Amino acid sequence: MAYPEDGDAGRLTRSQLGAEQQVGGQLTKTPVAESSEIERIQERSRFIREETVRLISIAKTGHYASTFSCAEIIAVLYYGIMRLRRGEPDWPDRDRFLMGKGHAAVGVYPVLSDWGFLDPSALDEYTRLGSPLGDHPDMQRVAGIDFSSGSLGHALSVGVGMLLAARMRALSFRVFVLLGDGELHEGQVWEAAAAASHHGLHNLVAIVDRNEYCLDGRVDDVLNIEPLAERWRAFGWDVREADGHDPAALLAILRGLLGDERRRAPAVLIAHTIKGRGVSFMEAEAGWHLGYLEQEDERDVLSELGATHEHA
Amino acid sequence: MSTRELRPGSWNILTVLDQAPGLKVLADTLNELVEDGHPVAVATADLKYSNGLYRFEENHPDRFVQFGVSEQNMVSAAAGMAAVGVVPHVATFASFLALLCCEQIRTDIAYTGLPVRLIGTHAGITLGFYGTSHHAIEDLAIMRAIPALDVIAPADATTLRAALRWYIDYPGPAYFRIGRGREPDCYIEGELEFERGKAIVHSAGADLTIVATGSMVHPAIAATEELRRQGYSIGFIDMHTIKPLDDAAVSAAAQRAPLMMSVEEHNVLGGLGGALAEVLADQGTPCRLHRHGMKDEYSLIGPPTHLYRHYRLDSDGIAKEAREFIELAQAS
């Protein structure tokens, strides 16, 4: 099987992607990350999952599985890709990160704290009365949140607007938009997709967390979104696919895209992921889109996450 | 390990489906309406577990449509269904239904006068720390401003059942605003008489009339009782229908007591309080109104019960708000 840019319109599975990476293809042409960098991102992915568990234990309700599926994506962006300045969440030319799937915010707050944007003690009050940190992100309350979200389908349009303004103000930042695959049901996503390619917004990178599940079941059973790569391509986007839990693959593709100065189209990376990744029973049951773990189960989950990462 | 082997304190959305009795009544009522021969269809947008309508899908899969996360498409499609003789009951969070789909509702459903039932669940601030994107404190005002659209906010599951049944043959559109299905019972099945546009007047009072709607009826009844224990003469009205509003009940109460207080889990602009203000002003009744609800601000983040306490939308808070209003009016 070939990569989509080679003209194959078929859908890639995670296992096929693994094999493909070993073969090389597109990936051999792009910068290869150092193993220490990969280890660092894996360690930060584990940090994101563990903090997600801890914060949800405060809220007593939360989106574990939806956050676990994109932990590596968040870690790769914040620790390998985005141009940020520590402690300067308002730096005008910083890269922006928009969460279409705002319900994964619980995994981003700890990272913002790590970057010195957010007081770490705020994490301990996650979702409590008057806390700045809710289940969905609020730019008015949290430094480092580049835009509020929670209603699916808006973020890609916001990214379009940011880059149109960047052009007017001669700023060179890039915008990364994390989209849920269920979110792609929303018509507004496709209005934004048309606008982005129409305006040649090559600094726009959408990342689809293709974990295959939304609330009511499998995304494609609820409302089919395939052939997904072809749909994006038909809207004029540069399309890549990767195993969304493989930091090396994510880094290579994103660096390849961002380093290609001839590119004029917006780009989308379809990241094939597993909802609940890292916790066996969450991987096996769709209901963990939303839930709560009591203390002993939480301890078991943390030890499974530790073991998973040690063997990764 | 599977979820079944977890400790009893752990849960996920599929293991806590029966914790919202009000939503079970929603699905049960729609099931009954189909079984009674009504041409009912049900549609939702990737929230069938959140709104309990998976129970309808189980019984009547041929009358259930899953639209995925595409609410505007669902609402316009419901208009199409209604145009060919089906009575669609469309449910999603009130924040998405009334705000995201406002124009589709206005143009495709209300302007066309089609019998679509719009069911906005988890209205107000009941989704707590999910934040403003999931709150609806504007829906009553928005829906009320749309001509030809009825707006109903049932206080409990019994009222919801009665209202859905009353409306089944009604030829026009209606918006039903409900909570998360855990609202305590206010009425007993069989004793409630639901009629379109007719408020349920519990009692008259000489000092103050409390007018509540939807989720605020239960705590407001408790607040009324508390104020009576403190020696005040308080009237109480359950204004389950915001539009058409029961003008007669409002003016009767205004003639009896010099003060009126609205209580709604909604912005104080444009909803129940706004509707009462319009009636009182139109009729020139010398009755002073205090509008209680969200004071034209976005809610803090927090668990729902903490928010209700903070915003004085629990029974103690409503009683305090009422007493302060009475004292302020007496002082001035």
Image (cartoon, coloured by chain):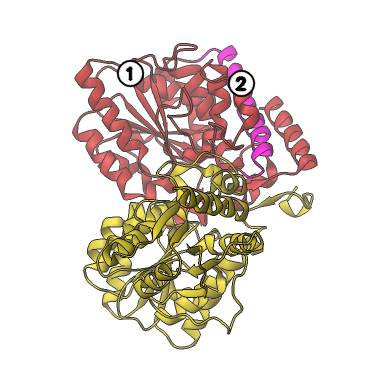
Chain colours: A red, B yellow
Picture coordinates of residue A305, whole percent (x, y): 70, 32
- Which quadrant, please, contains the N terminus of chain A? top left
Numbered badge on residue A120: 2
Label 2: which secondary element: helix
Quarter of the picture containing the C terminus of chain A is top right
- In this rendering, position of residue A137 left or right of residue B233: left
Q: Residue at x 51, y 76 (%)?
A: B161
The type of residue carrying mark 2 is Pro
Crowd rating for badge 1 (residues with CA inside 10 Å; few <14, some 14–19, many 20+)? many
Which of B245 and A175 lies nearest the eye of the viewer? Answer: B245
Check if residue A34 falls in the magenta segment: yes
SS assignment at label 1? loop
| Amino acid type for the residue under numbered disc 1 | Phe
Which residue is pictured at 47% across the width and 82% down the height?
A: B34
Q: Which residue is mark 1?
A: A173
Tell me whether marks 1 and 2 sit on the same chain.
Answer: yes
In the figure, B170 relative to B297: above or below? below
Q: Which residues are magenta?
A: A33-61
Residue drawn at x 43%, y 70% as measured from the top left: B253
